[in-house]
Image (spheres, grey):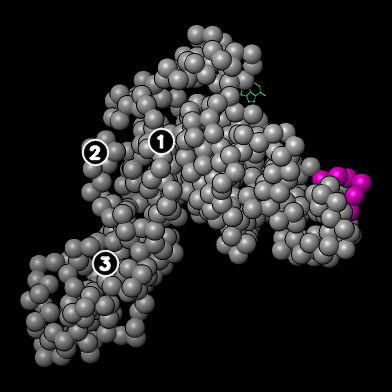
Amino acid sequence: MSRIVLEGISKIFGSKQAEGVDLIKQGKRKAEIAAACGAVVGLCNISFDIVEGEILTLMGLSGSGKSTLLRCMNRLVEPSCGRIAVGDVDVTKLGRKDLLAFRQKTFGMVFQHFALLPNRTILSNVGFGLELKNVPVARRTEAAMQAIELVGLKGWEAKYPHELSGGMQQRAGLARALAADAEVLLMDEAFSALDPLIRRDMQSELRDLQRKLKKTIVFVSHDLDEAVALGGRIVLMKDGEVVQIGQPEEIVARPATEYVARFVEHIDRAAVMRVGQVADRSAAVLAPTLTVAEARIRIAGEGGDAWLVADDESRFVGCLRADRLAAARPEETVASLLGAGSDAVVADARLDAVLARVAAEGCVAVVDPDGRLLGAVGSRDVVRALAAHSAESHATGHDADYPETSILQTTAGAERWTGPSRNFPSTRSATKASTGSPTMALG
Ligand SMILES: Nc1ncnc2c1ncn2[C@@H]1O[C@H](COP(=O)(O)OP(=O)(O)O)[C@@H](O)[C@H]1O
Ligand SMILES: [Mg+2]
């Protein structure tokens, strides 16, 4: 398994390669280059790393360069300039024969249209890549059957593609990529042709498979909800450039440009935000040894449905409901009022996973991976997080609502991406004129 490194990748389509690359090096962008010499810019100076074992989604509107970038990774599309390395192999330097072998060994591809061979059974389709590699039939069959089982198609191996539904055909397409045991799966709009319910199942199954098999997956999608459901970093593209890279909650909390802010405007915030981002960290914390009288003094003047209780090492002990505290006798201790232990959640849990508990329990305690109390999510914090318009914190230049994204487990590798490389106005007003509408037709 290896890290993929992209360095200064540009792609000019058509005959004006040298001119186009020259203009890119001068800092010109897609529209300017088209106007200057008519060259079609597919990709414009792209650099970032893909961490081994991550699932990364290339996102963007139709024509933003997602497929071109994906195909540059295994040189199905030849980049006009730049360097691609997979582990210690410089893919851009491979000769034709080595490239073919390396591509076959390292990359599996899954497309929107399943590209199954109609006159072959599912088993034979799934084993097809191995057949091309002259793997003996017994080993081929074993590997193909394993992959068929992994994608939940066991029992269908003797059928022909036309006997399977669209979703099942796409499972077969995925099995074919898995059977070859490639390190990296490149998936281009792989689920876009599927019905919504099936599509959602496939997204969560792919996420589970990825965790289990620890493959590196680069997934192209124009659908933000799909990118969120896949659960990894998102690379947001526009006009052949990378506009922002990050976990969805980072992009929502800190959109790099007005364009990004508008792109993520309608995202399901509860599915994206982490409880650690939303938690109130200034909430009063009570010691279990306090008496009710002492506790009342401690929280005098503060509102809330429940209070956090933690020991003197910040370890979470429980939540004390405000109504229980109000009804208790002054000499009782806080510890004696705690009900059956309510569990704290870790900071990187998604907000939507705790909504029901916040509603039922008044608040949910949030802890770090060592069990130390960070704060609490109450109903007011939920409403604030869901109502917050990301563009507002972007505009005012501070993220008062999300001060603690740094505690999140962000994927290493993002740091090599140095932000929009050039010419990205950082304020709303400056970008207003130049941004296209992110709500225009997708796909
Ligand atoms: N083979 C090609 N010849 C000429 N232009 C191309 C070719 N493939 C892609 N393009 C252009 O490159 C840009 C990016 O395309 P593509 O990578 O297919 O976008 P996406 O996958 O995001 O929809 C578009 O402007 C598209 O028209
Ligand atoms: Mg495409």
**Residue 265 location in percent, x, y?**
41, 40
Q: Is residue 430 found inside the magenta-colored segment of the image?
A: no
Mark sitting earlier along the chain (3/2): 3
Query: Looking at the picture, does residue 115 appear above or below residue 41?
Result: below
Q: Residue at x 40, y 50 (%)?
A: 249
Q: Quadrant of residue 396?
A: top left
C-alpha span from label 1 to label 2: 15 Å
**Horizontal and vertical percent position of residue 364:** 32, 70
Q: Which residues are magenta?
A: 116-123
Q: Which mark is residue 356?
A: none
Q: Which picture quadrant has residue 357?
A: bottom left
Neighbour class for label 3 at 10 Å: few (<14), some, many (≥20)? many
- Magenta run includes residue 119: yes
Q: Residue at x 27, y 41 (%)?
A: 393
Residue underneath mark 3 = 374
Q: Which residue is mark 1?
A: 260
Magenta stretch secondary structure, dominant: loop
Direction from residue 206 to residue 241 in the image, left or right: left
In the image, residue 404 sits, relative to residue 57, either above or below, namely below
Mark 2 secondary-structure assignment = loop
